[in-house]
Amino acid sequence: MPTKKEREHMDLVAQLGCFICRSPANLHHIRPKGTGIGRRSSHMEVIPLCYEHHQGKFSVHGSPKKFKAEYGTEKEMLEQVLEQVNLLRKQQDVFS
């Protein structure tokens, strides 16, 4: 169960829309190498992806090698997502 801080973070990430196409997004949890399929990584390490880019035919789960070749690694995407979330937080602070 995510903590309040994790839920707030995930809400901000979801607001960004799909990392690839900006459509409404679900959250993809990054899993470190060696982590089993049944274990989820941190709720702070999530990337917003629409269904097609998350679980569709050409997606992070459906075709991981092609997806990585086209869009970069999950860690690279995560770094960009975290930058965007930080900008969103700063904007929200200005208007609070």
Image (cartoon, rainbow, N blue to C red):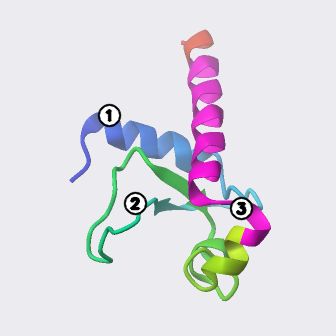
Q: Residues within 10 Å of mark 3 (few under 14, many from 20)?
A: some
The residue identified by callout 3 is 23
The reply to whether the magenta stretch includes residue 79 is: yes
Query: Which residue is at 62% across, 10% downward?
Result: 94
The residue identified by callout 2 is 32
Q: Which mark is residue 22?
A: none
Q: Position of residue 67 (x, y in %)?
A: 69, 74
Q: Give the quarter of the image for residue 52.
A: bottom right
Q: Position of residue 69 (x, y in %)?
A: 75, 70
Q: Position of residue 31 (x, y in %)?
A: 40, 62
Query: CA–CA distance between discs 3 and 1?
Result: 25 Å
Q: Secondary structure at mark 2?
A: loop
Identity of the amino acid at label 2? Pro
Bounds of the magenta span? Answer: 69-92
Q: Pointers 3 and 1 in contact (CB under 8 A)? A: no
- In primary-sequence order, the first of circles 3 and 1 is 1
Identity of the amino acid at label 3? Ser
